[in-house]
Image (cartoon, grey):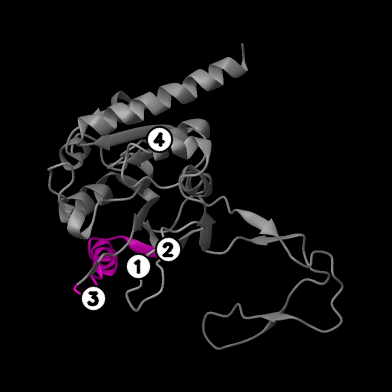
């Protein structure tokens, strides 16, 4: 039963731990794996193919895996690890539902190497079959309420190209784009994760969990590091499971979760 693992941080090899989970038991995975020259993590290996196989087994039909990854530059060339991993997910049965971008507001300055400063990571969104849940995030339209003098068109066709009129006046909100921008490591909730070398922003996890799950669903991070995904899930009234092979990082995750629980309790005192 998956319930015995819910709302816990589990220290262990994620492949071994996931093998304990029932088929089709997880609604969403949000994770950022080690990659390239970080293929050994705290002295442990990164069995990528086995991880993808287990993820496909345990994700519910219609469930989502958000895979946040980037490429190292070695000998003057990017490694293409991210694309190779995306293709492996598809080969093992997933659909590549969306290729999203995590853009960093405050990227680390880089030494000039005849290339531009790297400001983003990929967020590959894989689905097991057709997506079951999507709670779309919307943003204000720049010209909300504007009465258009001309006619604005949008292409909605699947086959032969055609044009359809859009609403006039301009709507108040529109669907958020698939490039999401976040400040890294500056906000208080992200400061707690500084003991981990590569945490992603709390708001990144928050936005994906809002998008692909409903309250009470189960969110897994199989390489949970500092526990950001688990904290965001808890804050949104989802259930979480965190796994990490490092005992040190499991302790960091548990400490952060307890801090957030204490803050919530203090709000009701």
Q: Are discs 1 and 4 less than 8 Å apart at CB?
A: no
In the image, which is nearer the foreground, mark 1 or mark 4?
A: 1
In-front residue for pair 80/93: 80
Residue drawn 29% across the image and 24% down it: 4
Distance from Cα at disc 1 to Cα at disc 3: 13 Å
Precedes in sequence: disc 4 or disc 3: 3
Q: Earlier in the sequence, mark 1 or mark 3?
A: 3
The residue beneath circle 2 is 120
Q: Residue furthest top?
A: 269
Alpha carbon separation for disc pair 1 and 4? 35 Å
Distance between the alpha carbons at the discs numbered 3 and 2: 18 Å
At numbered mark 4, what does the secondary structure look like: helix, strand or loop? helix
Q: Which residue is mark 3?
A: 76
Tell me the CA gap for discs 4 and 3: 36 Å
Q: Which residues are magenta?
A: 75-99
Left or right: residue 251 compared with residue 212? left
Residue 230's disc is 4
Answer few, some or many: residues within 10 Å of disc 1's Cα (few below 14, many 20 plus, some between 14 and 19): few
Q: Position of residue 163 (x, y in %)?
A: 67, 84
Circle 3 Cα neighbour tier, 10 Å, few/some/many (<14 / 14–19 / ≥20): few
- Dot 1 corresponds to which residue? 111
Closer to the eye: label 4 or 3: 3
Asked whether the beta carbons under mark 1 and mark 3 sit within 8 Å of each other, the answer is: no
Give the number of the mark in front: 4 or 2.
Answer: 2
Q: CA distance from mark 4 to mark 2?
A: 23 Å
Picture coordinates of residue 190, whole percent (x, y): 46, 39
Q: Please report the residue visible at 63 percent of the width from the left and 86 percent of the height from the top.
A: 162
């Amino acid at each position: 039963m998956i319930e015995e693992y819910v709302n816990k941080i589990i220290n262990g090899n994620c492949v071994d731990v996931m093998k304990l989970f029932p088929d089709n038991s997880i609604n969403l995975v949000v994770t950022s794996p080690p990659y390239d020259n970080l293929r050994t993590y705290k002295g442990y290996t990164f069995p990528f193919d086995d991880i993808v196989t287990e993820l496909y087994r345990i994700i519910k039909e219609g469930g989502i895996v958000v895979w946040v990854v980037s490429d190292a530059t070695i000998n003057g060339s990017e490694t293409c690890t991210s694309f190779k991993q995306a293709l492996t997910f598809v080969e093992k049965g997933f659909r590549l539902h969306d290729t999203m971008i995590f853009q960093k507001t405050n990227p680390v300055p880089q030494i000039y190497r005849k290339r531009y400063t790297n400001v983003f990571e990929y967020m590959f969104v894989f689905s097991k079959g057709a997506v079951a849940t999507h709670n779309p995030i919307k943003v204000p339209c720049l010209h909300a309420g504007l009465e258009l003098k001309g006619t604005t068109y949008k292409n909605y066709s699947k086959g032969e190209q055609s044009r359809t009129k859009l609403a006039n006046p301009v709507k108040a909100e529109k669907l958020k784009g698939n490039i999401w921008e976040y400040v890294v490591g500056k906000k208080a909730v992200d400061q707690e994760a500084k003991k981990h070398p590569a945490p992603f922003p709390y708001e990144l996890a928050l936005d994906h969990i809002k998008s692909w799950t409903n309250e009470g669903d189960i969110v897994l991070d199989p390489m949970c590091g500092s526990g950001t995904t688990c904290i965001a899930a808890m804050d949104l009234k989802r259930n979480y499971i965190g796994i990490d092979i490092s005992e040190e990082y499991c302790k960091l995750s548990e400490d952060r979760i307890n801090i957030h629980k204490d803050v919530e309790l203090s709000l009701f005192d």
